[in-house]
Image (cartoon, rainbow, N blue to C red):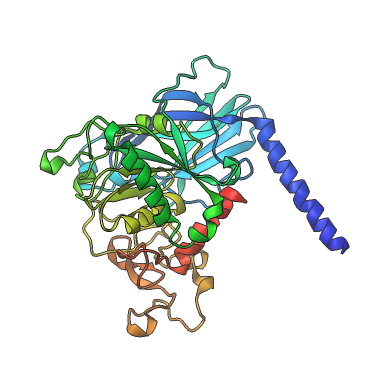
Amino acid sequence: MWKIKLVFLFCLFISFRTYAGFDDYFLSKTLRIDYIHAGSDTSEFYAIDELREEPLWGGSKVNLVDTFNYGNYKFIAYDNASGKIIFTKNYSSLFAEWRATDEAKTVTKSFSETVTMPYPKAKIKIEFYSRNKKGKWIKKFNYVIDPASYFISKEKKNKYDVEKVLYNGDPSTKVDIVIIPDGYKASEMAKFKTDCARFSGYLFGASPYKENKDNFNLWAVQIPSVDSGPDIPAENKWSNTAVGTSFYTFDSERYLMTYDNKTLHDVASNAPYDEIIILVNSDKYGGGGIYNLYCTVSSDNIHSNYVVTHEFGHTFGGLADEYYSSSVPTVDFYLKDVEPWEPNLTTLVNFDKKWKNMLDKNTPIPTPSTEKYKDTLGVFEGGGYQAKGVYRPRQDCTMMTISYNNFCPVCSKALQDMINFYTK
């Protein structure tokens, strides 16, 4: 009995110390850091654009340091006086994907990007790291921020009404998703509200989300667009919309993204949020998702239920695409001699750190793609847009084919681990 009491007291102490750390270093609002990320396939640089104070912090007040080591980029904030790490965030970006396209071999481009963190009480030093092609972290930029500076903007842009699509409690202990409409005119906002309810049903109709519905809040920002539907450049359709989504991103027809990063975050700041879903008013098949950036999905396609769970798997869980036969704009996205950071792919370079401990001891590695192993958790060749040298956990999965509510055990575990990180 005394051991149980000691464990309880220890856990209580750790919990107190963690929460006290937040109160020691942060206020319950957001520091938003907008910056320019530019370069080519061989060059890269960062430049500060703007600092903003926003009134809401939707993230955890306990887990302030990333434990997953996912993403192409890492942000670290230090207390400037003590040098103590007080916050980190890993993420990916459109810039990272663009650098793997043929265009990046001949052109230099710039992308607007954003990192958010709880608002510091005292000066901080921030550092930006990029993961190189060998998977190593390289420091690229550092900067000192004084939170008392009057140059940190408090201007409230794009203020709109927010509705609770789903509310289960304190944002600091929930996964908060803000849903932003694009291509919905003012006369179509009733449709947006109906679509939000439908998409909530899609998300929480699939495991492991449905078993964790009580751990989520969904917020919908009521921002109308001038025109209906997104841009479709190949059809010469150009729309004036709230956050500027467009098909044919990187000249891939189904890739539906936006480059208007600052407007997107202006709109998102109307609610506390951990993740962003852009709901695009269209019946055309398409969407996109990037880890800790945002997820997009067409509202009215026959496969929209699959698309939102697949793309949110990228955005929230850091899951990789497991398909390899569809055309994509990136080239050699995964090197065969480097272990992918995504939890659901392996090159077998460091498989011990992936799902090896989840396999049955009699399952061969690699695993043949035969009927015998149809529903077996294994190591199947083909994934990450490449037929050879990259392996996935199961023959089929929501990250592999158009199959709703079909996450394999590896993907399900990765998503569950992320839910726990935000809520426990």
Residue 318 seen by the camera: yes
Residue 101 spot, x, y in % from top left: 24, 47
85 versus 196 height, above or below? above
Q: Residue at x 20, y 39 (%)?
A: 231
Q: Residue at x 20, y 45 (%)?
A: 248
Q: How many marks?
A: 0
Q: Is residue 196 left or right of residue 417?
A: left
157 versus 168 height, above or below? above
Which corner quadrant of the image does residue 147 belong to? top right
Location of the N terminus by quadrant is bottom right
Q: Residue at x 79, y 52 (%)?
A: 10
Residue 327 spot, x, y in % from top left: 21, 58
Which corner quadrant of the image does residue 405 belong to? bottom left
| Extreme residue toward the right, this view | 2
Say which of 309 and 380 sits in front. Answer: 309
| Extreme residue toward the top, this view | 150
Say which of 81 and 326 sits in front. Answer: 326
Q: Residue at x 62, y 37 (%)?
A: 86
Say which of 130 and 55 sits in front. Answer: 55
258 versus 361 height, above or below? above
Residue 247 spot, x, y in % from top left: 22, 44
Residue 133 spot, x, y in % from top left: 37, 51
Residue 350 seen by the camera: no
Say which of 394 and 267 sits in front. Answer: 267
